Amino acid sequence: MLLAVVCAAVVAGCGTSDRSLVQSKVEQLQSATAHHAFRTLCTQVLAPSLLAHLTDYGIPCEKAMQLGLGHVTQPALAIGRIEVHGDTASVDTITTAKGQEASLDAIELVKTSAGWRVSSLGTPTVPK
């Protein structure tokens, strides 16, 4: 019985590459931002290191997300190059929102015990 459970768990994880998991996390970031799902951002998307910066300043995560993203309407994110290097990843993106200029940025991610999490948002990139 135990062997069957272990085999099922192994098979369930097959075919899911880090690259696809990183892409899914960035897509979740976009969706949570578009739907103003600040709790999702704080509990499922952002890395503990990024959350620690907020608490260092005494700002609850959901309040910080509301202040930073609450006014954003019709956000869109196009995913470009994805690079995974061990437990870190970088995703080139083009972001837009109603009334805002498009931006070419890199989103940095880190692999945690809970899966991939966003460790840095919107680092400007220079096209290569």
Image (cartoon, helix red, strand yellow):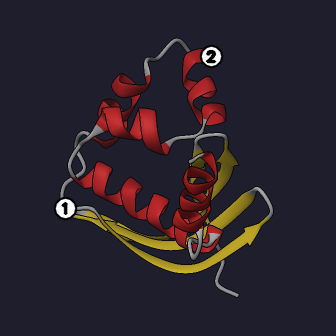
Q: Position of residue 84 (x, y in %)?
A: 72, 70
- Residue 106 at least partly seen: no
Q: Which mark is residue 91?
A: none
Q: In the rendered image, which quarter contains the C terminus?
A: bottom right
Q: Which residue is mark 2?
A: 56
Name the kind of residue labelled 1 in the image. Gln
Q: Which residue is mark 1?
A: 74
The quarter of the picture where residue 16 lies is: bottom right
Upstream in sequence: badge 2 or badge 1 = 2
For this orientation, the residue located farthest to the top is 58
Q: Residue at x 57, y 56 (%)?
A: 4
In this rendering, the count of numbered labels is: 2
Depth order, front residue of 31/105: 31
Q: Secondary structure at mark 2?
A: helix
Depth order, front residue of 111/90: 111
Q: Is residue 54 above or below residue 49?
A: above
Q: Position of residue 51 (x, y in %)?
A: 56, 29
Name the kind of residue labelled 2 in the image. Asp
